[in-house]
Image: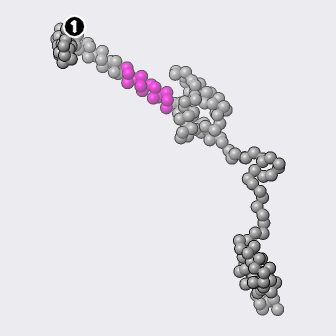
């Protein structure tokens, strides 16, 4: 086109646009502005319809029990036509709930599988009778550092063994 600088090209394009706008009559300018406003209004209306559809889908999914991130996942997995009514959305949500119940708060307590060999899945059974410090007290008795538990008074015996002494009144025990 014969332009040596970018600025010259920009100036030429700007002049051409201004010439086209000046060539339009006043009536044509009004028609063009009205057409632009109509296009913007149609775009806003389409966005509002899309938001309304999404809200209707979310409401149905929440009604089935989906919340939080599960709600967002359920929205992505819900397959319905754009112009579907509430009954079609409810049917699709019901089908989704049967396929993916964990999205709708139906996940119960997970029971771990049994370990091989018949042992409990949580590990070995707890052993009863172990009182913290009792093993050390038994070793001290065996080596003669402590008297046997039969020779100790009940309060001292409870302190060594780690249990509470029986509540016996001295007057009633005689």
- Residue at 57 percent across and 24 percent down: it is 80
- Residue at 55 percent across and 30 percent down: it is 76
Residue in the foreground of this view, choosing between 19 and 139? 139
- Residue at 78 percent across and 52 percent down: it is 120
Residue located beneath label 1 in the image: 1
Q: Is residue 124 left or right of residue 22?
A: right
Q: Position of residue 88 (x, y in %)?
A: 59, 25
Tell me, yes or no, whether the highlighted magenta stretch contains residue 104.
no
Residue numbers of the magenta segment: 42-55
Choose top left, top right, bottom left or bottom right for residue 32: top left
Q: Is residue 22 left or right of residue 56?
A: left
Tell me, yes or no, whether the highlighted magenta stretch contains residue 52.
yes
**Image quadrant where one finds the N terminus:** top left
Residue in the foreground of this view, choosing between 73 and 6? 6
Q: Is residue 6 left or right of residue 85?
A: left
Q: Position of residue 166 (x, y in %)?
A: 76, 81
Choose top left, top right, bottom left or bottom right for residue 126: bottom right
Choose top left, top right, bottom left or bottom right for residue 39: top left
* 81 versus 143 height, above or below: above
Residue in the foreground of this view, choosing between 149 and 165? 149
Q: Secondary structure at mark 1?
A: loop
Colour style of the rendered protein structure: one colour
Q: Position of residue 93 (x, y in %)?
A: 60, 30
For residue 75, say whether it is visible: yes
* 19 versus 50 height, above or below: above
**Image quadrant where one finds the C terminus:** bottom right
């Amino acid at each position: 086109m014969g332009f040596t600088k970018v600025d010259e090209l920009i100036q030429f394009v700007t002049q051409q646009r201004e010439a086209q706008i000046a060539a339009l009559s006043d009536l044509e300018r009004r028609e063009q502005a009205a057409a632009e406003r109509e296009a913007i209004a149609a775009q806003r209306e389409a966005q509002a319809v899309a938001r309304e559809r999404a809200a209707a889908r979310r409401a149905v999914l929440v009604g089935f029990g989906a919340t939080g991130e599960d709600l967002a996942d359920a929205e992505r997995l819900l397959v319905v036509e754009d112009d579907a009514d509430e009954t079609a959305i409810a049917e699709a949500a019901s089908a989704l709930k049967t396929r993916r119940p964990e999205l709708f708060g139906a996940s119960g307590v997970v029971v771990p599988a049994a370990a091989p060999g018949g042992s409990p899945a949580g590990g070995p059974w707890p052993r009863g009778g172990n009182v913290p410090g009792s093993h050390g007290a038994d070793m001290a008795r065996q080596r003669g550092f402590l008297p046997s538990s039969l020779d100790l008074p009940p309060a001292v015996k409870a302190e060594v063994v780690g249990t509470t002494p029986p509540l016996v009144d001295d007057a009633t025990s005689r």
